Amino acid sequence: RERERDHTAKEGERHNRATEIFISFFPSFPFSPPRRAAPPAAREFRSMAAEARNHNTRKHASGQRTSKKGGAGGKHTWGKPGDELMTDTVEAEDPNFDPADGQEMPPMPSPTRTKSCEPELSELEKQLIPLTKEYFETGDIDEFKLSFTRLAPAPDTAAAIELMVQLGVEHTDAERELVSNLLSALYGDVLHVADVERGFSKLLDNLSDLKLDNPDAPDALGRFMARAVADDILPPAFVNKHPAAAGDFANPHVRVAIKKAHTLITMKHGMARLDQVWGVHGTRTPVKLLVKNINEILEEYMSSEDCEEVRRLLHELGVPHFHHEVVYEAVNRALSNGEKDREATLIVTLLKNFSSTNFFTPNQVEAGFKRIFADMEEIVLDVPNAFKYLEKLLARCCEAGIVTPQFADTAPKRAARKRYHSENDGKIKE
């Protein structure tokens, strides 16, 4: 410390001496006055501060300092080499915890589980809902009856009637017709009068809940009861003597259902008309009526240009095997109005929409066009340029991906007409 003070004093003397010599040579130079040496107390304080700094950086100066994170520190680093081989301990509460890894799972407190929003299905619902939906697809009553009698345990027939009618209410009139036919077919062997009455009583009790998802539930249930009366599986007294028939029942939805059933039963020739209370659907529909309905749907589409509405109406018809008739009528309409480009554009848009979503299968589309090909000789009598319009329509369908170019090449071509003597230069040419 004394050597350091002596060295500082000598440096100050040298600095002052050099300044005096410089000023003697350049007296006019704006130089600051000579710096005076610091007092001993200040020099001692500076020395103590320097010693403290040297003490704090001693480890760094010696080169023996270790990193805080074992070489894995710093920004944008993934850890030190070898960390990727280490496996983290998975806690028992972690969803990825696997007891097979050799880790003992400590006893866990029973967690609070949130209940699912969807109600749990009963054993009857788990068995009967798939069975009924399969019946909606096949329409095979004998197969349904055989499968229903094999259900274990034996189902409550009243609850089964309630569930089947509820499924019918949730579907279209075609499925409702199937449910009515099914109840009539099961009556006697599987169902009895008491079962039917209890089933419809349960439906009336739960009608308010059923209406939440199906706004037309009261009207549909009234039709179901009227059809059951017409099929002699439900006594008319169930409707006529119900408390809601007098109009002073508390539940307004039950009043609507009973009133609907009572009106259908008591109307003139009501029993004879109730056979078609759901309309005529599916395979029972006459072909002429189907063609008429399809033409009405296409006529409405030309005004609304709504493909989804056409899809909904065709779905309600319940004849997916008859979609080739839709293709035939649509193409025939485009040929009959070939001079109007709007007609052809709408038809191509409709066919593209349905073929791309597989609502119309490729076989049905080709079947509809093949029927047009076969009737071209008759169509050309009413539309002389039908071959020309058909060629243009097929070209647009190929661009839209509705039919393949190979199929379009199979379209008939109009034969060249003979030219006679009076038409040209006296020669007969093909």
Image (spheres, helix red, strand yellow):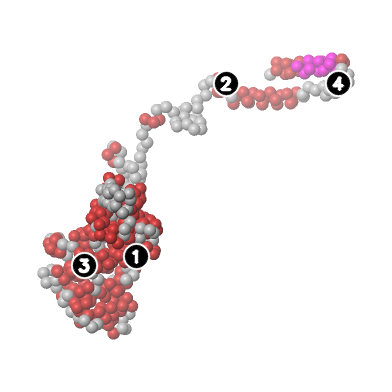
Q: Where does residue 40 sit, x and y in percent of width and height?
A: 75, 23
User: SS class of the residue under badge 3?
Assistant: loop
Residue corresponding to mark 3: 286
Residue type beneath disc 2: Ala
Residue 299's disc is: 1
- Judging by the rendered image, the residue that carries numbered circle 2 is 61
Q: Mark 3 or mark 2, which has the lower sequence index?
A: 2
> Horizontally, is 140 left or right of 303 in the view?
left
Q: Label 4 amino acid?
A: Phe
The residue singled out by tag 4 in the image is 29
Q: Earlier in the sequence, mark 1 or mark 2?
A: 2
Mark 2, secondary structure of its residue? helix
- Tell me if label 1 and label 3 are in contact, CB under 8 Å: no
Please state which of the two labelled residues, at mark 3 or mark 2, is closer to the viewer.
3
Where 68 falls versus 317 (above or below)?
above
Tell me the residue at 18%/73% (across/down): 196
Between disc 1 and disc 4, whose residue precedes? 4
- Visible residue check, residue 406: yes
Query: Between disc 1 and disc 3, whose residue precedes?
Result: 3
Name the residue at 23% across, 83% down. 268
The spot of residue 100 in percent (x, y) is 27, 39
